Amino acid sequence: MKEIFELIDKECDRQNEGIELIASENYASKMVRKACGSILTNKYAEGYPNRRYYGGCKYVDLVEELAIKKACELFGSKYANVQPHSGSQANAAAYRALMPAGGKILSLVLNDGGHLTHGSPVSFSSHLYDFVHYPLSSDGKLDYEVILEIAKKEKPNAILAGYSAYPYIIDFKKFKEICDEVGCYFIVDMAHIAGLVASGKHPNPVPYADIVTSTTHKTLRGPRGGLILTNSDELIKKINSAIFPYYQGGPLEHIIAGKAICFDEALKDDFKEYAGKIIENTKACRDVLAKLGALTSDTENHLFLLNTLDSYGITGKDAQNKLEEIDITANKNMIPGDKLSPKETSGLRIGFAAITTRGCTKQDAEKIALIIHEYLANKIDAVTAKKQVKEMTSSWQKIEEL
Ligand code: DSN
C-alpha cells in the first residue's frame, strides 16, 4: 500500500526537520526498529516461556527469556514481566496484583503531573479503584509530611509515586517509609524516568517498591511498550496472571525482542553519558528561559514546565500551536494550581530526551530557549525562527541512522 509508505516518509522528514521537545518521546535505534519490524510478529505465544498455549515457541521463548534477564540486570530486580503492551496495561496489572477492585490508591492527580491511569475520571483506573490524591506544595514539589498525613487518614491499600510532568528527583526511600508506617503497598510508575534510573542519574525505585511499572520508549529509548518489575516471589505470579490471561492475549514477541535490545543498549557506558547529557540540556534550556524572564519550574531530570500564560500571555494550547508553525513540537500541559482546563492549560511541558539522542548540545539547548522565548514574545517572525530551527536540526544525526 503505497500511501502508507509515502506517509511514513513524510513523518520521517517531519521528525528529522523538527525540534522534538515532547518529554515522553525518543528515537529508537536501528537495531530496536529492526527487531520490531521482524518476522517475530508472525508468532502467537500466549502464556510465558516454557508454559505456552501454542507450539513452535522454542525461539520466542529464548527471546522473551533474554528480555527478562536484561531487564532484571539493568534495574537490579529479581523478576520482570516484559509483555505489557503499554504503560497503562502495566499499571492495570500492578493494581490488580495488589488489591481487589474497589481498593484504595493514594496518588498524584493528573493536573499536578500524575498520569491518566493514576485515577483520572476518564480512565478505567478511577472506575475500578478508589483513588485519593496528594497535592504538590506551592513550590510544585512533593511534600512528604503532607503525604504521610493523608496516608494516615485515608489508609490506602497502596501509594503510587512516579509521574508524567514532575521535574524533580523523587525520594523513593521516604515514600517507602510512609508506606511502612501506614502498612500499605508501594507502587512506582517510572515510565518517564526509566532511562535516568537505568543510568544511575535518578535513584532506583526497585529496592523500595513492591511493584515498579514502566514504559520502554521514553527516556529508555526503546520500542513503544510496557514493563513490570518486582522482587517479590508472590507478586510476580499475580502480575503474570494479571497481564495474561486477565488483561492481554498474545504477547508481541517482535516488540519484546526490541525491548531486549533496548535494555542491552541501556547497559552500555555511552547510555550513561547520554542520560547525563539529557539532564544537562534540559537545565541549560530552562536556565536561559528563566534568565530571559520566563516563568518556569526548575528541573532535576529530563523535563521542565514553562508557564506560557504568565510569561507570554498565551495558553499552553496556543503556545503549542504557535511553536508547531516553526517546527518545534512540545505539548500543552497543566501547571501546578492551573486554573485552565486540560484542553487549554497555562503552560508547556518541555523535555530533551529525544533531541539529545540526535546530538543536541548544551549550546543548542540554550539557543532553543532563545528561539522559543523570542518567538513566543513576538520578537522574531516565523520565517526567521524556522530558519534557525532548520539550521540546527540539519546539523544533528538523521533519525534513520541512529
Ligand atoms: N502520554 C505520556 C506522556 O506524554 O507523558 C504518558 O503516558
Image (cartoon, helix red, strand yellow):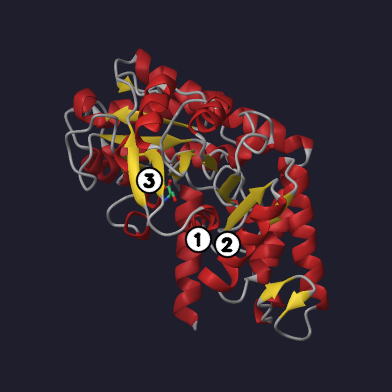
Q: Judge by depth and name the residue closer to the eye, 270 or 5.
A: 270
Task: Give the amino acid type for the residue marked by disc 1 in the picture.
Answer: Gln
251 or 221: nearer the eye?
A: 251
**Depicted 252 relative to depicted 342: above or below:** below
Q: Disc 1 beta carbon < 8 A from ligand 1? A: no
Q: Which residue is mark 2?
A: 84
The numbered mark, 1 or 2, whose residue comes first in the sequence reads 2
Q: Along the horizontal axis of the image, is 335 left or right of 268?
A: left
In this rendering, does residue 354 appear at all? yes
Question: Which residue is at a point 43% across and 41% down the rendered structure image?
Answer: 164
Label 1 vs 3, first from the N-terminus = 1
Determine the residue located farthest toward the bottom in the rendered image: 55
User: Are discs 1 and 2 less than 8 Å apart at CB?
Assistant: yes
Q: Which residue occupies the foreground of this view, 196 or 396? A: 196
Q: Which residue is identified by label 1?
A: 89
Residue 277: percent from left, percent from top? 61, 29
User: Whole-Å distance between the Cαs marked 1 and 2?
Assistant: 6 Å
The amino acid type of the residue labelled 3 equals Asp
- Residue 256 falls left or right of residue 93: right
- Residue shown at the point (47%, 76%) measured from the top left: 4
Tag 2: amino acid:
Pro
Q: Which residue is mark 3?
A: 327
Q: Residues within 10 Å of mark 2 (few under 14, many from 20)?
A: many
The spot of residue 195 in percent (x, y) is 62, 40
SS assignment at label 3: loop
Rendering quarter of residue 304 = top left
Task: Indicate which disc, 3 or 2, sits on the residue closer to the N terminus.
Answer: 2
Helix, strand or loop status at disc 2 = loop
